[in-house]
């Protein structure tokens, strides 16, 4: 199979752009074939196990449920495959296959690639009315699309949910270091949230709220951000909008800042949730500003974002007639862990101002900087913003407080128009009054945050990070050491041969086979194959077990590579 | 009449109606329909494309996209009415001459019971899994509880399945998600009007889906047995007209018990509507958010989930929430029940944007599980209080000689004030609405519900007796042309005690 797929590759330098796209089709096909294979295998296994357990009625039910789920998945995959092939055929391979990538993590990638010559709104279905009925006669084509994205993206996560590692009960279960979730302080959070001040009910909390967020919470958020972002002047609660999560905030911003088909610039690699949000509801395109790992004169640090690169990407996009409305920055960056210096920030903002671009800046990891030599500068701390009316800040408690299940995201913007427009969505992204009260109490408790939570959190981050980096160093694996975030961006290129996204996917599968979930570079739109993100914000015992599995896979892989080299040498 | 964002003419607040966004939104819906009198089947695409709203709105802003300007306009018109009310909210002690809100459909009668229940120790449970990324369909323990709860209260012939349940932060989100996964941009749902107008915004904001009204009349004609009766014939006609105009209709929205009419559909009627939908391959979204707020036992409510053999189970999607039946509109908990796995999955994949806190999910599961409290404490008391409040307001209306509709369900009475309009126009309706507001009582006018006859108002009665009494006094003053007469709080106090006991 790999031979045939190999035919797609075009090494010619002039054709690089083309080659990249082909490679994507190639990778997509590969992903799907693998997935299909896996599903069919599972189906077969299920058939045999069912035979053995026929007497157990419950078991039977569970099996038939699993079978129907698998059938549905098969359907979706077949559909996507057909679609992909069709799009390839119709577009002469130059057409962008915007099928969702198969991602292990929940932050699904939309897979919209800016290089494409065409950017259909709901790309997967654009060409394929007949297929629509193949999957479901009940959904709209965008509904089918959404569903397919879900299926392909969440399948591995579903497997993880069913077979989670547990130190006593399920030592053979999956360990998930692919998800950026902070599990280091669940003890502290559980204790704090169990205190009696959290359980408070009053009429106003049960009634229709102010859809921008309850005033008491917006006031507290303004105070909180003023303090932790070191804002020169007090922030104004009227500029705060509170929604149920940062994805919701971004989704609404994309709706009110862009019309369908318009675009945002975003430096890649980047957190794939943006791609998902951009294509799911708002149908906004992302123009990637590709960053390189290689250090050159123009690129003094690996993956460094420079104004030149921004400018080039913007101008190229404009040449193709794209309307670019804004720039998305993540600071501290995900997955790189980069923390932008004050000067860099200023430059990026000046660049955006020059071109009348909105800047959406996601500071969701702002309190997760654990290296004391690194200072985080919130964009809100700047004495004067270059273009305050086009600068929109996102923050939430999911990462910094490790409560992703709380569903809380904040928008801070000086632009009242934008705040009002976003507030129209309050109905669709509202948070329970009861939860708003708890969040307010939490953010209010500065004493606990400063004296208990943050010191403990950061020292645990440091320890976990130290453990992980030591392991990586011992294995001789290059990685970025940036002192922030819950994850490490590492380079496993040396385990790929050849260095392609297919090989990256295969390596990823090997980790999966060994019950370890990581997230691979392609899901962050990284242009170089071989990069992986590994989360370290978990318990030491679990990390130890995970690194053991990690090591196993890599040493097996090393053996394979040596064998392969030997064979090649013999042949020559 | 409405209220497009026009620069020159400072458009009237319309019935900015109700103070709470809920009803305000209805007005927005209203706002979309500029020339409704000429063109009852208003078309959103027209409005978006050539109409002034877009043009006006987008030229207003250098920062928003054109759809962003339309979206913002929804908020602004809400704000307008909201401000009026919120700047001068009634408070027994602090602002006795403030505005009484009889416009927002909220149940304010049972906070005592609810806050007591929600403060019990079982509600204060925190565990790590509740703080982490959830199953986006809703935690399994909650979906199981919802399935059990609905099986019991909807009297489903067979137990409902947790796999068919999706939990989100309110029915508004559910309308939005369903519109998105069932329709393409510009396609439409049928909806009998008058209807809860906020749905217009819910299906439009993200989904770009419009509503095609099935207009109902107050006049009883033909085979009708009651005013504003929904019949299959009317559904057929509306669908035909939409088809004729090239509008692709993908579904039908039913609200049962109906808002604002308070109508309860009989099993026979329900089946007829469902058969109609099946014939035309339409999805049916049944919003049963008032299902436990039927306070008149004789009314005999039947959930669509109680029907033996749904005509088209794969296209029948049921919505329920705690906002109304448990008087917790601020809790943001809504749920979908559908046998269609594709639809459930598609909606669930949008739940990333419509999730609710794990801790709240836990509390909801505890609440729904507590059958003893619900059956023995909450429901009997809630129904008794609703009935008492209803009896009082209905009595007042009768004394004024005002015709009204009410079938013993919901929090509101649909009131016929046509005789108080000098001319049967929406302009006059709005003037009357404004006179109410000037006299410090907020109602929702029919226009906000897309009612085609001017002069109908929705009056919410699910509030404390003294507020109701004052509110009705102010309504009476306006209708009797004596708005200037000061309130007589004393009389309300005495009324209250009598009223409390029914």
Image: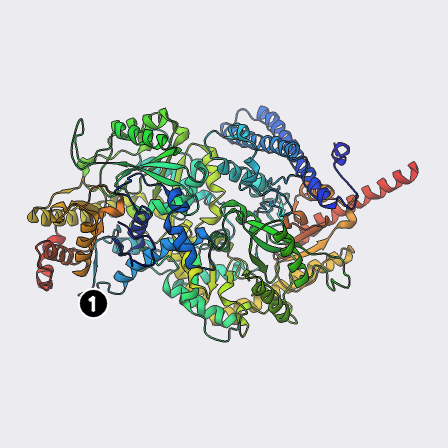
Dot 1 crowding, Cα within 10 Å, few <14, some 14–19, many 20+: few
The N terminus of chain A sits in image quarter: top right
Q: Chain of mark 1?
A: B
Q: Is residue B306 above or below residue A417?
A: above
The C terminus of chain A sits in image quarter: top right
Name the quadrant containing residue B209.
Answer: top left
Question: Which residue position holds label 1?
Answer: B95
Q: Position of residue A136 (x, y in %)?
A: 49, 30
Q: Position of residue A357 (x, y in %)?
A: 55, 60
Q: Position of residue A264 (x, y in %)?
A: 57, 54
Say left or right for B288 vs A294. left
Q: Residue at x 58, y 23 (%)?
A: A51
Name the one closer to the observer, A219 or A367.
A219
Say left or right for A298 vs B99. right
- Residue B352 seen in this snapshot: yes
Name the quadrant containing residue A432.
Answer: bottom left
Name the one closer to the observer, A159 or B434.
B434
Q: Is residue B74 above or below residue A92?
A: below
Q: Is residue A426 above or below residue B249?
A: below
Say left or right for B473 vs B450. left
Provide the secondary structure element on which disc 1 rests. Answer: loop
Q: Is residue A377 above or below residue A569?
A: below
- Residue A360 seen in this snapshot: no
Q: Position of residue B288 (x, y in %)?
A: 31, 39
């Amino acid at each position: 199979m790999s031979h045939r797929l190999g035919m797609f590759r075009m090494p010619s330098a002039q054709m690089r752009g083309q080659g990249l796209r082909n490679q994507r089709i190639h990778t997509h096909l590969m992903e799907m074939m693998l997935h299909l294979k896996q599903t069919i295998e599972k189906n077969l296994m299920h058939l045999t196990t069912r035979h053995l357990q026929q007497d157990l009625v419950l078991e039977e039910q569970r099996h038939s449920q699993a079978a129907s789920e698998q059938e549905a998945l098969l359907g979706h995959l077949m559909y996507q495959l057909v679609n992909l092939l069709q799009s390839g055929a119709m577009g002469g391979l130059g057409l962008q296959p915007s099928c969702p990538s198969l991602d292990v993590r929940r932050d699904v990638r939309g897979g919209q690639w800016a290089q494409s010559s065409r950017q259909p709104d709901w790309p997967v279905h654009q060409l394929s009315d007949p297929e629509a009925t193949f999957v479901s006669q009940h959904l709209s084509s965008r509904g089918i699309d959404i569903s397919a994205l879900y299926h392909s993206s969440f399948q591995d996560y579903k497997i993880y949910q069913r077979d989670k590692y547990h130190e006593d009960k399920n030592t053979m279960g999956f360990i998930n270091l692919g998800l950026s979730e902070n599990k280091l302080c669940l003890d502290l959070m559980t204790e704090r949230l169990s205190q009696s001040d959290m359980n408070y009910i009053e009429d106003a909390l049960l009634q229709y709220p102010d859809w921008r967020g309850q005033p008491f919470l917006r006031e507290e958020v303004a105070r909180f951000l003023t303090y932790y972002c070191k804002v020169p002047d007090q922030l104004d609660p009227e500029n705060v909008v509170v929604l149920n999560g940062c994805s919701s905030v971004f989704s609404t911003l994309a709706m009110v800042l862009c019309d369908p088909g318009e675009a945002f610039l975003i430096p890649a690699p980047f957190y794939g949730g943006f791609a998902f949000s951009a294509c799911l509801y708002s149908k906004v395109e992302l123009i990637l500003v590709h960053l390189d790992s290689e250090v050159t004169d123009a690129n003094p640090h690996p993956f460094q974002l420079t104004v030149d690169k921004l400018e080039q990407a913007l101008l190229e996009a404009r040449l193709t007639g794209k309307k670019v409305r804004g720039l998305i920055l993540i600071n501290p960056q995900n997955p790189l862990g980069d923390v932008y210096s004050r000067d860099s920030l200023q430059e990026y903002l000046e660049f955006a101002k020059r071109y009348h671009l909105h800047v959406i800046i996601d500071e969701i990891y702002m309190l997760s900087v654990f290296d004391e030599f690194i200072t985080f500068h919130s964009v809100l701390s700047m004495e004067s913003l270059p273009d305050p009316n086009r600068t929109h800040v996102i923050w939430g408690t999911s990462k910094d407080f490790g409560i992703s299940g709380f569903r809380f995201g904040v928008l801070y913007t000086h632009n009242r128009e934008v705040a009002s427009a976003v507030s129209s969505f309050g109905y669709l992204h509202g948070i329970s009054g009861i939860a708003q009260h708890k969040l307010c109490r939490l953010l209010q408790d500065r004493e606990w945050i400063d004296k208990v939570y943050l010191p403990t959190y950061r020292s645990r981050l440091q320890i976990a990070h130290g453990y992980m980096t030591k392991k990586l160093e011992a294995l001789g694996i290059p990685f970025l050491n940036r002192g922030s975030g819950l994850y490490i961006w590492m380079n496993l290129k040396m385990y790929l041969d050849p260095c392609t996204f297919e090989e990256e996917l295969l390596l990823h599968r090997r980790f999966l086979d060994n019950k370890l979930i990581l997230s691979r570079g392609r899901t962050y739109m990284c242009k170089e194959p071989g990069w992986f993100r590994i989360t370290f914000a978990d318990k030491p015992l679990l990390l130890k077990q995970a690194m053991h599995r990690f090591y196993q896979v890599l040493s097996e892989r090393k053996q394979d590579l040596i064998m392969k080299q030997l064979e090649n040498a013999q042949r020559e | 009449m409405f209220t497009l964002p026009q620069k020159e003419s400072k458009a009237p607040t319309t019935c900015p109606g109700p103070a709470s966004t809920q009803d305000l939104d209805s007005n927005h819906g209203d706002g979309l329909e500029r020339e409704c009198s000429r063109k009852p089947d208003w078309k959103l695409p027209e409005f978006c494309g050539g109409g002034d709203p877009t043009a006006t709105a987008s030229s207003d802003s250098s920062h928003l996209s054109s759809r962003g300007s339309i979206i913002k306009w929804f908020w602004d018109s809400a704000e307008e009415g909201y401000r009026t009310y919120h700047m001068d909210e009634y408070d027994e002690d602090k602002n006795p001459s403030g505005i009484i809100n009889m416009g927002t459909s909220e149940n304010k009668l049972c906070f005592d019971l609810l806050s007591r229940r929600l403060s019990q120790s079982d509600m204060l449970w925190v565990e790590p899994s509740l703080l982490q990324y959830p199953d986006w369909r809703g935690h399994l323990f909650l979906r199981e509880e919802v399935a059990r709860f609905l099986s019991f209260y909807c009297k489903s012939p067979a137990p409902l399945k947790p796999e068919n349940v999706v939990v989100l932060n309110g029915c508004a989100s559910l309308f939005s998600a369903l519109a998105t996964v069932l329709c393409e941009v510009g396609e439409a749902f049928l909806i009998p009007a008058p209807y809860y107008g906020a749905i217009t915004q819910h299906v439009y904001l993200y989904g770009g889906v419009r509503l095609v009204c099935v207009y109902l009349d107050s006049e009883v004609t033909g085979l009708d047995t009651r005013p504003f009766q929904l019949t299959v014939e009317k559904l057929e006609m509306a669908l035909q007209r939409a088809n004729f105009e090239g509008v692709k209709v993908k579904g039908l929205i039913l609200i049962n018990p109906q808002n604002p009419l308070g109508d309860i559909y009989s099993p026979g009627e329900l089946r007829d509507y469902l058969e109609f939908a099946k014939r035309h391959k339409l999805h049916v979204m049944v919003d049963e958010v008032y299902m436990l707020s039927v306070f008149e036992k004789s009314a005999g409510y039947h959930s669509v989930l109680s029907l033996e053999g749904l005509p088209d189970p794969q296209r029948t999607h049921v919505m329920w929430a705690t906002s109304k039946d448990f008087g917790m509109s601020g809790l943001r908990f809504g749920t979908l029940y559908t046998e269609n796995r594709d639809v459930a999955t598609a909606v669930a994949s949008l739940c990333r944007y419509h999730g609710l806190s794990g801790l709240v999910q836990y509390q909801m599961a505890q609440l729904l599980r507590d059958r003893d409290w619900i059956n023995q404490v909450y429901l009997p008391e809630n129904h008794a209080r609703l009935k008492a409040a209803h009896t009082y307001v209905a009595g007042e209306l009768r004394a004024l000689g005002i015709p009204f509709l009410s079938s013993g369900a919901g929090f509101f009475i649909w009131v016929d004030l046509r005789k108080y309009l000098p001319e049967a126009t929406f302009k006059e309706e709005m003037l009357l609405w404004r006179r109410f507001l000037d006299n410090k009582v907020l109602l929702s006018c029919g226009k906000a519900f897309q009612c085609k006859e001017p002069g109908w108002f929705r009056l919410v009665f699910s509030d404390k007796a003294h507020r109701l009494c004052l509110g009705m006094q102010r309504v009476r003053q306006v209708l009797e042309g004596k708005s200037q007469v000061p309130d007589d709080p004393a009389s309300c106090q005495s009324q209250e005690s009598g009223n409390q006991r029914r």
